[in-house]
Amino acid sequence: MPLDPAGRSAPKRPAPARPTAGRLATTVEPDAVHSVIHTSGTTGEPKAVELTYANHAASATAAADALGVHPDDRWLCPLPLHHVGGLGVLIRCVLNRTTAVIHERFEVDRVRGTLEGGEVTLASLVPTMLARLREGGLREAPGLRAIALGGGPIPAGLLEWARDTGIPVVPVYGMTETCSQIVAGSPGRPLRGVELEIAAGGEILVRGPMVARGELGSDGWLHTGDLGRIDADGRLHVEGRLKELIVTGGENVAPLEVEQALLAHPAVEDAGVAGRPDPEWGEAVTAFVVLREQASAEELRRWCRERLAPFKVPKAVHAVDALPRNTGGKLLRGRLGS
C-alpha cells in the first residue's frame, strides 16, 4: 500500500468511473438552437446570432434549388468555418450527402490549382478572393458548375472577366441573420421561401424560414440595414449599407457607388470609401485605394468626376498598401485610414 509523506498508509483512491456509451440522437428538434455565429462586425461590434436546425435546413434547400445538387458534387470552401458562409458549405454537403473540399485558409496558388485541375464542381468565394485569382492567372476551371460569390461588393469588371474566361460565377447576397444566401444572380432573384420588401427609407427587409427568429422586428421582418431596390422583374439591387451613408453638404452618398467608380479605373486594385468629419461639408467623401500601377489622386478624382455627381466625388484620395478586411474578406470601413 502506498504511504503518505508522514509514513502513514494512504487511502486508496477510487478508480475513475468508466464512461458509459451514450445513445446517438436519431431525431432533431427543428426549432432548437443549432449554432451561434457572430456577425462580421464591419459596421459595429460583432453580434451573436442564434440559428436553428430549421434555419440551416431551409437555407440548404434554397441553395440547392438555386445551384442544383449532383451526387458527385465537390464543394470547395476556403472560407473561415466560424462564419456563416463557410459553415453553410459544410451543412449543405452533409444534408445533400455530397463532398466538401476544405482549405484551412485561402491561398491563391492552391485554390487556382484546385479549380484548374477540375477537382471541384462548386466553390464559395468572396470577391477579393476571385480578384486575386484573376491576378494570379486563373484561366480555366473545368468541371466547375458555379462559384457562389458573396460577402461583399463585386469590383467593377470582375464578372465580365469571369464570363469572358468561361468561369461560371453566381453572385449571391445574404448575411448571418439569414443563414447565408437569400438571393442569387446579378441582379439577385430571391431564393425559394424568401420574401423581400423595401421600407420607406430604402432599407431591405427579409423574412422566410432561413431567417433567425430572434432577429425579426416587431413587424415580423428582418431589418437588414442594407439599402436596395426591387426592379419590375422582382430582382434585388443592393446599393450599400444604411449606416455607411455619408452625409456631405446635405446630400447622401453611398460609399459602394464611389468604390465601384474607383475600381473601374485600370490602376486601382482595391478601394474603400468613408466619410471623414469636415467643418464645411459635415462629412467629406474620402477614398483609400490600393494601386496596381501609378496614378495620382487628381487623376482618380477626375475619373470619378466623369462618372459621378459632383457631390459624390472624393474630396481626398489616399494610396495605401492594403485595406483593412476581416477573415471573410469584408471591408472594415471604420478602420480606413487608421
Image (spheres, rainbow, N blue to C red):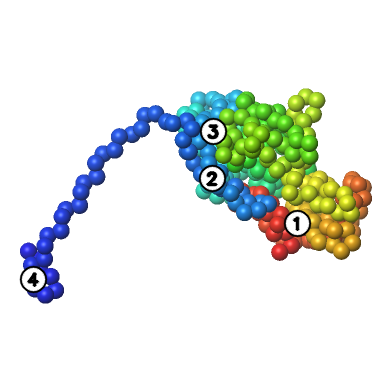
The residue that label 3 is drawn on is 55
Amino acid at pointer 1: Val
Q: Earlier in the sequence, mark 4 or mark 2?
A: 4
Which label belongs to residue 300? none
Amino acid at pointer 3: Asn
Q: Earlier in the sequence, mark 1 or mark 4?
A: 4
| Front residue (pair 60, 125) | 60
What residue do we see at 13% from left, 70% from top? 4
The residue that label 2 is drawn on is 37
Q: Are marks 1 and 4 in contact (CB under 8 Å)?
A: no
Helix, strand or loop at label 1? It is strand
- Neighbor class of circle 2 (other Cα within 10 Å; few <14, some 14-19, many 20+) is some
The residue that label 1 is drawn on is 290
Expressed as whole percent of the image width and height from the top left, the position of residue 224 reads 68, 40
Expressed as whole percent of the image width and height from the top left, the position of residue 86 reads 55, 42
Q: Are marks 1 and 2 in contact (CB under 8 Å)?
A: no
Helix, strand or loop at label 4? It is loop
Helix, strand or loop at label 2? It is strand
| Front residue (pair 21, 155) | 21
Q: Is residue 326 above or below residue 66?
A: below
| Quadrant the C terminus occupies | bottom right
**Location of residue 78 by image quarter:** top right
- Report the mark closest to the observer, 1 or 2: 2
Expressed as whole percent of the image width and height from the top left, the position of residue 204 reads 72, 37
